[in-house]
Image: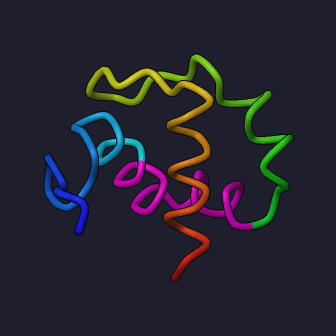
Amino acid sequence: METKEYNGHPSWEHWNASLWVSNDFDLYQLFTTLPIDDLLGMFDGYTTGDGCTFTPELVTYAFDSVNEE
């Protein structure tokens, strides 16, 4: 079994990206309606209100997190 490092996520950055996308209605709408390729272009370099900068890995992780539900 894989060990999680931050609130059940691989890192603080993964947790933060997933948290912002899950809890911001506008972000959630985008991440649940647009294809991942569009999101990668739109959000690479996006920074959350508490300083987490999205990378392609974090965009993909957040996308997968909200689309698992």
19 or 61, which is in the foreground? 61
Q: Is residue 30 left or right of residue 5?
A: right
Secondary structure mostly seen in magenta is helix
Examine the structure image and report whether residue 31 is included in the region drawn in magenta.
yes
12 or 29, which is in the foreground? 12
Going 31% across and 34% down the picture, which residue do you hit? 13
What color scheme is it?
rainbow
Q: Is residue 26 left or right of residue 38?
A: left
Above or below, 48 against 30 in this view is above
64 or 34, which is in the foreground? 64
Residue 22 in picture, x, y percent from top left: 44, 62
Quadrant the N terminus occupies: bottom left
4 or 20, which is in the foreground? 4
Residue 60 in picture, x, y percent from top left: 61, 46
Residue 19 in picture, x, y percent from top left: 34, 54
Examine the structure image and report whether residue 35 is included in the region drawn in magenta.
no
Magenta segment range? 18-32
Number of numbered discs present? 0
Going 74% across and 34% down the picture, which residue do you hit? 40
Instruction: In the displayed orientation, state which residue is furthest to the front.
Output: 1
Residue 32 in picture, x, y percent from top left: 70, 66
Going 61% across and 72% down the picture, which residue do you hit? 67
Going 40% across and 30% down the picture, which residue do you hit? 48
